[in-house]
Image (cartoon, grey):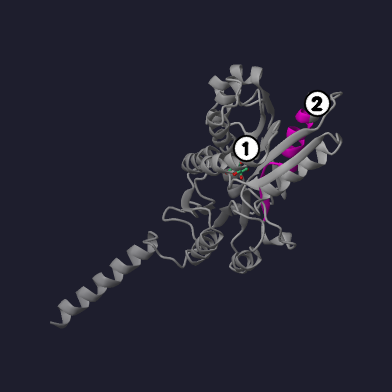
Amino acid sequence: MLKRLSVAMVGAVLLSSALAGCGGGDDSSSGSGSDDKIVLGFSQVGAESGWRTANTKSIQDSAKAAGIELKFADAQGKQENQITAIRSFITQKVDVIAFSPVVTSGWDAVLKEAKDAGIPVILTDRSVDSQDTSLYVSFLGSDFVEEGKKAGQWLVDQYKGKTGTVNIVELQGTTGAAPAIDRQKGFADTIASDPNLKVVKSQTGDFTRAQGKTVMETFLQSTPKIDVLYAHNDDMGLGAIEAIEAAGKKPGTDIKIITVDAVKDGMTALSEGKINYIVECSPLLGPQLMDIVKQVKSGGTPEKRILTKETTFTQEQAKTELPNRQY
Ligand code: GZL
């Protein structure tokens, strides 16, 4: 009896040490997966636009290609869901956290928790207004003020030397979001050079097609003369086009339209003459993000602000560019 008992005990000890040795889900490790894979926790804003869908695909495809284990959480547009996801990544002891903050404010507490847990955080796409920039290692994304300036400059050039007031309506992105704040600022600062250019109505359409349509309907009902629409993204511009056509007006002709993003649907409308000018904002941040993750994991220090390269498109350029669009 005694002999059988000791054999069983030896077997149990051997089995448990074998499991521990091959990383059988032991959470006490630094977060690396079973075969020493880097584990990245990513909190995404949601799925509000064609841009976001393309951004998510870029991150998921790039993680797979880089051999990085991705824990992906969709916040459905809610900051509290992003905070919950980041806390979950901390509990799971992931190696790196990355996220696209839905709005700029309210992140210091949870970012400090990540810092105290020794988990580096990378901001992608949108930034935060934290004064303590040690709370994140890097920001990868666009210069939204510059995007607003490009949109404004096109308009200034269109109306150079002309007389008469130009009534502009503006569809803002999500209230409090970095792209909404900065695209509005860049545009306003640039058109200020021509006193004839006036923003007569400005309201959020939350970056969605549906709300872009609804808000444009109210603009059309309340504003007798609309010459220009500036929409902070293609999706709101496409929704507005539906409202403009329903009101019996010709988008791109009766009302000039400028948008930002350059997703396929936007570029199609541009090539058809329904949009007049699009400022590109690239969602394809995945490959660069994975390079930064690997750099951070191996002890490197990435640049604090890494800007994506972007351009602009006219109606003529859209016709040739459209077949090349990946998203
Ligand atoms: C910009 C991104 C914006 C896009 C919108 O980097 O945050 O959010 O312009 C998206 O289409 O919804």
| Residue that badge 1 annotates | 220
| Residue that badge 2 annotates | 159
Q: Is mark 1 within 8 Å of ligand 1?
A: no
Circle 1 crowding by C-alpha within 10 Å: few under 14, some 14–19, many from 20: some
Decide whether residue 151 is among the magenta residues: yes
Q: Residue furthest bottom?
A: 2
Ligand 1 - quadrant of the structure image: top right
Q: Nearer the viewer, residue 295 or 176?
A: 176
Decide whether residue 47 is among the magenta residues: no
Query: In x, y percent, where is residue 3?
Result: 16, 79
Q: Nearer the viewer, residue 269 or 222?
A: 222
Observer able to see residue 124? yes
Q: What residue type is disc 2 on?
A: Tyr
Magenta range: 137-155
Residue 219 in which image quadrant: top right
Q: What residue type is disc 1 on?
A: Leu
Q: Nearer the viewer, residue 53 or 149?
A: 149
| Chief SS of the magenta region | helix
Q: Residue furthest left?
A: 1
Q: Nearer the viewer, mark 2 or mark 1?
A: 1
Query: In x, y percent, where is residue 244?
Result: 58, 31
Q: Earlier in the sequence, mark 2 or mark 1?
A: 2
